Image: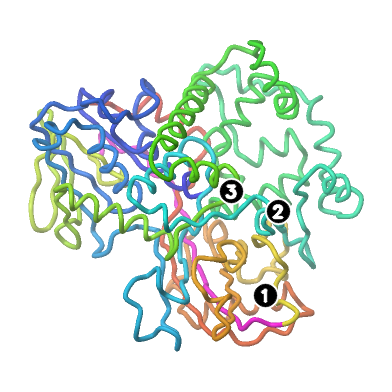
Amino acid sequence: MLARRLQAAALIAPPSCRALRRAVAPSARAFLPRTRSLATTTSTPLEPPHTLAVVGGGLSGLSSAFYFLNALSPAARQAAKVVLLEKETRFGGWCKSVPIPTKEDAATIKDRKDAALIFETGPRSIRPVGLQGWLTVELAHSLGLTPLLLTVPKSHPSAKNRYVYHPTSLTLLPSSLPTALSAAFTKPIIRSALPGILLEPFRPRSPLHDLPDGGDESVDSFFSRRFGVPLAENMISAMIHGIYSGDTRGLSMRAVFPGLWEAEREWGSVVRAGLFSGVARKYGKKGRKESPYRIEVGKQEEEMGRIKERLRGVEGGDELVKRMEGASVWGVKGGLETITDALRNWLVEQGVEVRSGSAGDVTAVEHINGHWTVATPTSTLSATHLITSNPLVLPSSLRPPPTPSTTVSVINLAFPLTTPALFPSGFGYLIPRSVVPSQNPHHALGVIFDSDVMPSLDSSSSNPNLALSKVSMLLGGAYWLPKGPPNPLPNNDTLVGWAMDTLRLHFPKTTFPEPTFTLTHTHKECIPQVPVGYENYLSTRIPLF
């Protein structure tokens, strides 16, 4: 989930962009030509002297600076200057892990990882899947965080038990073929989707794939067309609420599910591709002509293998690879902000100049005579290279078209442990847009059972003197588009009240105690909603330098 959310980062570079591309985080490569698949640690992308300005001190900006420096030779690193600019006084962006003082440690918390209770207001886990997933594992290991890494095995209840709210109760989603067969006869929301799934292999391939630009459509249109409206409205809309806090009717299929889009293009059917593509590729047979996307996927799979080999070659790496291969998700003791803290500290140790607050608040960017001029209220910086996680700071001639972004309120709640438990064991539940307003009056997107998702993040549930059950509710998102969130934004008491109302509505047989601890945070315009056709626009219109 976190890797997908980072794909909004933008990078603009001078003529040496092919070499620089190898130095930046994959999450920041969206606007570069796909000439190389990955960084190496021995290449020298720039000949000194050069100045790189990185706009944005969240995970995208921090990791881009990290990969840039690691791709330089020692001599080039000594000569290159890197300046990191962040308009906030804290670094980390959406990664924010908040230690909550309790009677157990109120006077003794010296480090976030030692706190008995931590609330994650942003992302809280990372999937060790795909190239970005394994790059993040390698990054954490190279920062010395391996002793703090927490893994949740695929056999854990939070990995197997995921729910969808379908009035007026939670429906456990199938996690295996036997449970899928059983659910098809016993659970109405699954049964309603079954005919569409069975008919999918026999539905025609979309003519959109034959357009010169490769075509595109909304996520909702694709799943409704291929799998039927019930699955699109009840299952996929809930999934997108959880990943993008978005509306499937406005999101680009090619941007959100490129693999499924390519499966239909190559094989004419997602189901047929799932059944036969792996075997066909093994024996050198393929569907239609492979697209640049599919070729890039092959390169990424090769690079994942190289990452694992690199990890196995360092102390503790072999055990880490085994843990990650058996993990559903992973996190960090003390929260994911531990990663961004470690990145910032490492960059400072390497001599990166860090500017925050007004000194890092970029007000204007210009590209003149092959150089970038980056202005803040306190100074002007001249740079040969620019990485920005916020493309809106770019000159109008270079700026991609704006995309809407969702605003999400996160309500963290910690209840006393009870018998029976307040919540079922599992990851949490998502709420599809098909749920009527009377069953979701406050526009909740879903609820995460934090004590199950990352049980060792803190000692809040295992410490007998605390004995807490943590959950987080997400509100707003797609429901607040296009008009935007309420103005003024709801305050802490209002948000907690909305969360409690929603829980009582969804669990009518449960008597909820008052939460022992609460925390609320509203992330303004935090997740870009990539519209239909946006990637085609970028591939043909974004200028490169």
Mark 2, Cα crowd under 10 Å, few <14 / some 14-19 / many 20+, is some
Residue receiving disc 2: 160
- The disc, 2 or 3, on the residue closer to the chain's N-terminal end is 2
Above or below: residue 49 compared with residue 425: above
Dot placed on the residue nearer the N-terminal end, 3 or 1 = 3
Q: Amino acid at mark 1?
A: Leu
The image shows residue 467 at horizontal and vertical percentages of 59, 81
Question: Which dot marks residue 370?
Answer: none
State how far apart marks 3 and 1 are (Cα): 30 Å
Amino acid on which the number 3 mark rests in the picture: Ala
The residue labelled by disc 3 is: 327
230 versus 75 height, above or below: below
Q: Which residues are magenta?
A: 396-418
Labelled disc at residue 503: 1
Q: Which label lies toward us, 2 or 3?
A: 3
Task: Give the mark toward the camera: 3 or 1.
Answer: 3
Query: Residue 484: x percent and y percent?
Result: 47, 61
Which residue is rendered at x = 35% and y = 32% of the image? 31
Mark 2 lies on a secondary structure that is: helix
Q: Of the residues under marks 2 and 1, which one precedes in the sequence?
A: 2
Is residue 111 shown in magenta? no
Horizontal side, residue 75 vs residue 327: left or right: left
Q: Which residue reaches farthest front? A: 315
Determine whether label 2 and label 1 are within 8 Å by CB.
no
Image quadrant for the C terminus?
A: top left
Residues at marks 2 and 1, CA–CA distance in whole angstroms: 22 Å
